[in-house]
Amino acid sequence: MIKFIRNLSINRKLLLILLFSSASSLLFAGLLLIVLEISEFQKNTRDDLSAVARIVGNRSTAALMFGDSDLANENLSVFDNLPDVQLACLYDAQDIVFAQLQKKDHKTWICPVSIKSEITRFENDHLHITQPIVVDGAELGTVYIHADLTLAYWRRIQFSGLILLVLAGVSILSFFLSAPLLTLISSPVKKLVDKVKNISDTKDYSLRAVKVNNDELGVLVDAFNGLIGTVEIQNRALTQAKDRYLALYDDNPTMVFNLDVDGRILSVNRTGAKQLNLSVEELQGCSISDFVHVDDLLGMHSLFERCLTRPLQVYKQEIRQVCNNGRIIWVRATARLVENENQQSSLLLVGEDITEARLLNEKIAYQASHDALTGLANRSELDRHIKQTVALACEDGSEHALCYLDLDQFKVVNDTCGHLAGDELLRQLGELLRKYIRRNDFVARLGGDEFGVLMNNCSLNEASRVCETLRDLIRDFRFAWEDRSFTIGVSIGISAINGSSGNAVNLLKEADAACYAAKDKGRNRVHVFRPDDEELAIRHGEMQWVEKIQQGLEQNRFCLYGQPIVSIANNDEGMHFETLVRYQENNGQIIPPGAFLPAAERYNLASLLDRWVISHLFEWIATKQGFLDELSLCSVNLSGLSLSDETMLAFISEQFSKWALPPHKICFEVTETAAIANLSNATKFINQLKERGCFFSLDDFGSGLSSFAYLKNLPVDFLKIDGLFVKDILDDKVDLAMVKSINEVGHVMDKKTIAEFVENEQIFNLLYVLGVDYAQGYGIGKPVPLDELKLIKPYSGASK
């Protein structure tokens, strides 16, 4: 019943409320009316009958006192006029019926035997009245009345029913009159409900309810419209937020997966589906492991276990994903455990496609470990393999070999055909080495025209045999470029790797030293490094000098000496000397140049040493008070590398400007060998400095094979005759003839001559006879620190 009523419309509920309230009111009013009417009737009847009984009692006082029953009956006859009274009794003082009135219709009703226990009372629809007769405080008797109120009750009920009928009619009339008024409430509510349904169905929050009245329903409509307006704004904001989230989710460049704890895909964004070449619907329910490379499955499972073990942590793992089309991509997966509003756990997996970055890293790693020109491993990669091999040898006592290869005629190809040809030659030789080395050996390009081969599990004898084979292959190799064909050779140094070997750096030094030894022996040969090898010891000593030279340049450990050069015929020339360089050890020991100059020239440090000498020499001359006035000429040695150094001319000019030295006070010495090896560069270099006013001297002249042929092309001012000819001219006619010839040719070319190794007065005097211009040697003066230089006069005999 209640459920039925709940489902009724507002209008019907209001009608039902009105009907129910009217019926209830009518019912309660009727019942109340009947109850009140009967109660009032009973009260009035009782009061009325009690009053009559009292009057009858008062009238019957005399009859009781005188025993006059007729008078008593006469007094009781008054009840004949009261239809409801059916029995009336008069009792004397002894509780005996003195007189009675009994209606004919109720003969069965009799007066009670005793009146003592009777009281005035209602019994169902009967009324019992008991009224004592009291005179002066004495009870003379009692009047008893028994009334049947059935008909009276019925009349009252009929009256009440009539009234109820009237009320019912009025209620019905009111109901029909009130029903139209209910629409004033139900109609706006119905319209509001219809609008709510319309908004709910269409999701159009721009709709508004129509306000009919300004009553409470009008307030409700206004509140509803305001609420819908708020909902519209919030819905618009929510829609925008949803769109932004969907854009962020689906258009995110990363792949976003929501997985259950078993790895099944609960949801995935469009990017993830597109990367895997499937639709979102096809991916839902699949296992993420189906798209993980088989080699990365353990890593993926480990990632899941870590997320489940420590749910608050974020974990990362780089894996390979296999797309539906078979394409493999590298993904950086970031995962953590999350919970939804229902406390259900799932895995949030965000994958970033790092395929390009991975390939780039691999490319960079490859480029970092390989030579770009030949595709072979580079020096750093060879160092790494050497370290591994040394560790293996120390561990199991195995024996290996490291080979250092240096091409012998590569510069010819480079200079003749250009660097493109040189690069192609290196590529072809790299492929040749890769093809013919043993299966387990490792080949690398060390730089320039140098290669390294690491021979694993190989004895020195076997390594020598394999290297000879490689040497023969390279010797027989013909390199063709355009219309030219070249043959080249290779010098190979071998160093043994065993349990007692040093680190990779020392092993490469040993192999490099052996390779240089092979070159020194005539090139295109194989040389094995042995600790007791005297040649390698010299080379090793030179390599040790490299670091000392560098330290000496940084810490100014070099010091300048000077050796006098005197004029043989003219005693009046000022101070003329050759600048020499020495190395000073920490303990103060002075090391002659023969110990470190070969290393400086071999390892391209000679040019740096020349710069140090020039800068410090110019500074000393400029700051030595009065020395410049005594100075006639100062000779400074230049190495062959300095002649080829394009920046050396600018450096020398800068030093001249810095210390304000007159160029005609400086003479630069170059060796005949260096000048001939760099003839064009040397000629250009000499001419530019001579234009500034500097002098040039050709050192060690006569030691070359074609000295006189090149002499006319070198614009030098002095020829220094090689001391190997000068020191024995007293005893060796050939040396005497050589010195004489060089001196005469020099004078013909208008060049002055300087004889070296003048060790005594006899040689000095003979040079005077031959017409040599200047002399230098221990017989004239030994090298001394610059501060100890002083003007030296020649032997007295020479001046005669």
Image (cartoon, helix red, strand yellow):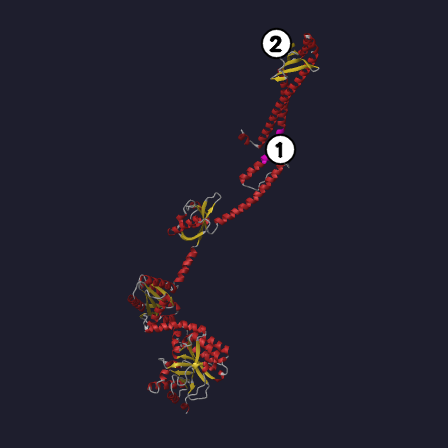
Amino acid under disc 2? Lys
Q: Earlier in the sequence, mark 1 or mark 2?
A: 2
Quarter location, residue 193: top right
| Residue 99 screen position, x and y as percent | 66, 9
- The residue indicated by pointer 2 is 107
Q: Are marks 1 and 2 in contact (CB under 8 Å)?
A: no
Residue 408 makes an appearance in the image: no
| Mark 1 → mark 2, Cα distance in angstroms | 67 Å
Q: In the displayed structure, does residue 50 sit left or right of residue 252? A: right
Which region of the structure is painted magenta? Answer: 178-191
Q: Which residue in the rendered view is the most extreme toward the bottom?
A: 800
| Helix, strand or loop: magenta stretch | helix
Mark on residue 488?
none
Q: Is 182 part of what is drawn in magenta?
A: yes
Image position of 600 with respect to 160: above or below:
below
Q: In the displayed structure, does residue 657 sit left or right of residue 396? A: right
Residue 462 makes an appearance in the image: yes
Residue at the image point whose x is 36% and y is 72% from the top: 540
- The residue indicated by pointer 1 is 184
Amino acid under disc 1? Leu
Number of other residues with Cα within 10 Å of mark 2, as a class: few under 14, some 14 to 19, many 20 or more: few
Quarter location, residue 191: top right
| Residue 646 screen position, x and y as percent | 44, 74
Q: Quadrant of the C terminus?
A: bottom left
Q: Nearer the viewer, residue 241 or 37?
A: 37
Q: How many marks?
A: 2
Number of other residues with Cα within 10 Å of mark 1, as a class: few under 14, some 14 to 19, many 20 or more: some
Quarter location, residue 175: top right
Q: Is 660 part of what is drawn in magenta?
A: no
Q: Nearer the viewer, residue 750 or 753?
A: 753
Q: Nearer the viewer, residue 637 or 586?
A: 586
